[in-house]
Image: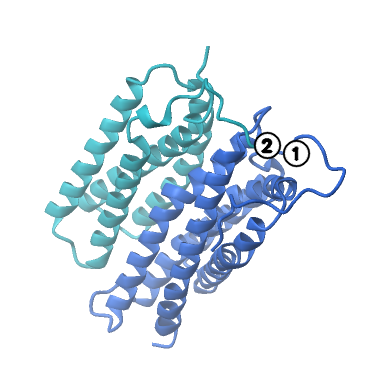
Chain colours: A cyan, B blue
Amino acid sequence: MTSPMASSTPDQATLPPISEVAVGVIALVVAGGIYLASYLPRRAPLGPAFGILAVAAALLLWNVVSLSRLGPFAWGTFFLVGKWAFLAYLVIAGMLEYVFVLDHTRGSILVVLTLMLAIFAVNIPLLLAFSVARYQSPDG
Amino acid sequence: MVDVSAAAPPAPPGAMGPPVVPEFSIVPLRALPLVVAVLVGLVVAIAANSLWALDWYHVVGGGLWTGIDLFVGLIIGPIIGRLSIQARIEFTTRFMPKMVLLMPTLVTMTLASGWQLARHLGNLNAHYHNHWWLVTSFIVVGVMAVIALGFLEPANLGVLFELKKPRPDGELIGKLMRRFVYTAGITGVMQVATLVIMTKLAVA
């Protein structure tokens, strides 16, 4: 089975560090969630939470921009994996949002948690889709 | 832990030609109704605030998650590393698709029900005398989530898509399988910490 990687797959060394940045975003979102949860039922100071959210959003945006600048890439595979993963993680994020609302989380804390869940639901499908598509032959 | 890309045992006499990759589905669609049923049951348990149902979801989900992580990382992983390439392919194409559905479902079951359970029992309250044990469990689960979502799951999908190619790259599969087994082993060991914390909380 061992064969040289098909020469038509992208040169792995030249790809931007999209996977690494996406893992960083997951770590930030998880850290933000733990920070907010550790104060319950009191209200956590929101400054650090908004800071974490802003950095996570900026990194996610950087990843999207980096993806859009890629040359030939297996976009068909990327979107195939991405859309199904997005559906799955939308269900998971939706369940978490449902729990927060059911537990009477309101106001700015709900806004921060919802935005973190939104980043989570976009970032993980992006990571999974990129991780698969990077080893596939580019479209066309 | 074991190097799963290490040289496989020699092929039996007469075994010639490239290994055969059996037909397989990356996501076992027949199991989807079961996943939906489990998740609907979880929503009902949360909405109904049923302590028994929440406890059931948390204990069953957590027990299976912990057990499977330990079993895959410490028992199955080293065995895979010693199989022939053909056997590894046969095992992988039957085992990995099931993990694609099973593990996210177990994680969702465990975390959502655990959160509600802790809330109902008052364990989330900062004045709860074991509050920091609970926060430590959040941190352990958080690190495991980063490892599972950031490394383990992408490696799992990567292997399956590579095996779907007409000429799979054995070197790449070996690299991704090694990542899968190592990360499963790390989360398995971290699950021991979760077991310590959860048993401590259960008797508190």
Task: Tell me where residue A117 appears, x and y as whole percent.
Answer: 34, 46
Q: Classify residue B197 as left or right of residue A35.
A: right
Q: Residues within 10 Å of mark 2 (few under 14, many from 20)?
A: some
Amino acid of disc 1? Pro
The answer to whether A51 is drawn above or below residue B127 in the figure is above
Inter-mark Cα distance, 1 to 2: 6 Å
Looking at the image, which is closer to me, A119 or B71?
B71
**Chain assignment, label 2:** A
Q: Amino acid at mark 2?
A: Met
Residue under label 1, please give it. B19
Q: Indicate the quadrant containing the N terminus of chain B: top left, top right, bottom left or bottom right.
A: bottom right
**Corner quadrant of residue A65:** top left
Residue drawn at x 20%, y 67% as measured from the top left: A42
The kind of secondary structure element at disc 1 is loop
Q: Residue at x 31, y 52 (%)?
A: A27
The quadrant where residue B52 appears: bottom right
Relative depth, front residue between A53 and B97: B97
Q: Which mark is residue A1?
A: 2
Q: Is residue B110 visible?
A: no
Give the residue furthest to the bottom: B203
Judge if badges 1 and 2 mark residues of a common chain: no
Badge 1 crowding class, 10 Å Cα cut-off, few under 14, some 14 to 19, many 20 or more, is some
Please indicate, yes or no, whether residue B184 appears anywhere in the rendered image: yes
Instruction: Give the residue at x 57% y 45%.
Output: B174
